[in-house]
Amino acid sequence: MQRQENKFHARIRKLLPMWKWGREYGKDAHIMNFHLLEQYLDSLEEEYGIPGLDMIVTKDHREVFRRSVGFADAQRTRPVSDRDFYMFYSCTKVVTMTAMMQLIEQGKAGLYDPVSRFLPEWAHMTVINADYKTREFNFSPKLSEPSHYARQQVRIIDCMSMMAGLTYDLHSEAIEELLSKNPEATTREVVGAIARMPLLFEPGTHYKYSLGHDVIAAVIETVSGERYSDYLKAHIFDPLGITDLTCHPTEEQLARLSAMYVFDPKSQKMKLMEKPDNSFAITPNYESGGAALYGTMRAYAEVLDALANEGVGRNGVRILKKESVLMFTHSVTTGQALQEFRVGRFLEYGYGLGVRVKTDSLLGHSPVGEFGWDGAAGGYGVVDPFQHVSIFYVEHILNFFEGYSVIHPRVRDLVYKGLNR
């Protein structure tokens, strides 16, 4: 009898801190339970061979869940930790969109402004004559491709929503010609070269994942008068107290870089890469608005936490107005463009201002309006500005498509099950 009472009291003592935390959120608060999420994360090495991963969930600026699994080095001597650096690839896009929205809310640019207002090379764009859908998936036109003048200007919103008609070709003829003459070309110069290439379709008519956010980085530079990386540091990272998020990592930060792997579909195994893939840094001075950032998991999570809390960081500093954050909760894609975006894995989402946006309440456990994006190496961010919840999951594996289609939505749903226990 005494033994049973001791077990009971031990259980109560374990739950008491959680109960006290829940009390701070009022009479409707409840104890959260993330044991299913923990079990799932712990199973991923055995199921898929994921060597290391990290994850954090915040609510109302409080860390309510954290799990680090595996090792950050190939020798398995360095457990995953806060200090590990990652290449965030397209997770960069959420930060670029935050920067652009800062300038829009200040009245320095508008969603429907033509890009040519800031980048004159974009005033007279051409569109290929052929139906781009008859070409292979990664088709990129040549300068000689038969084309006609676009009937409307490429706008800021078209670049943000991937509806500008661009490709994701950083080795197009125009760019290669520029780099042959100037191998240290700047972001602004490379984006000027991109404007020489024919568009795949009339701006605003279709969805095609592309270099639109790299164009936005050049717009940010022109509007602000600051280099893209300097703008991010001065107006997002420094205000939030972030030091480990950068386009240009130091030697000390690179020494903390987590080992990078690539999934081999033939062997169905993760293979160690001798050196990280840095293919988006095409010159020392080119800063990709779509893929430039390196950083720690916790540093990037601070940005998501600020967006989830109406634009205010954990330290009380505001980086966006609430109204600007809520603009991310609406889709831009409709009709044919929405169908094109959903091909493969986004059945419950539309694409908005540079982010996927939850549009279907029947699929998945997160609310309509939840938004975020992911990265080529498996980073996955979720922002829920309605319940003030943010999620960031990170691994360092390229070419692992099951991560996007299976792991990411599963992680999201287990978070919300844990929140609502």
Image (tube, rainbow, N blue to C red):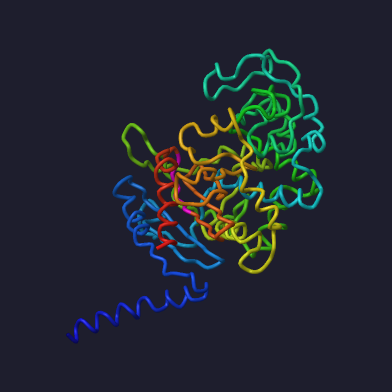
Q: Residue at x 35, y 81 (%)?
A: 13
Magenta-tinted stretch: 393-398
Nearest to the observer: residue 39 or residue 223? 39
How far across and how far down the image is residue 316, in percent? 66, 68
Q: Quadrant of residue 250?
A: bottom right
Quadrant where the C terminus lies? bottom left
Outermost left residue: 1
Q: Residue at x 63, y 64 (%)?
A: 313
Q: Residue at x 56, y 22 (%)?
A: 139
Nearest to the observer: residue 409 or residue 245? 409
Q: Is residue 54 left or right of residue 207?
A: left
- From what the image shows, is residue 138 above or below residue 50? above
Q: Quadrant of residue 331?
A: top right
Query: In the rendered structure, does residue 395 fall within the stretch colored magenta?
Result: yes
Q: Is residue 192 left or right of residue 292?
A: right
Q: Main secondary structure of the magenta part?
A: strand
How far across and how far down the image is residue 173, in percent? 66, 23
- From what the image shows, is residue 154 above or below residue 299? above
Nearest to the observer: residue 255 or residue 419? 419
Q: How many marks?
A: 0
Quadrant where the N terminus lies? bottom left
- From what the image shows, is residue 76 above or below residue 13? above
How far across and how far down the image is residue 64, in percent? 47, 66
Q: Is residue 69 left or right of residue 256?
A: left
Outermost bottom residue: 2
Query: In the rendered structure, does residue 189 fall within the stretch colored magenta?
Result: no
How far across and how far down the image is residue 230, in percent? 72, 53
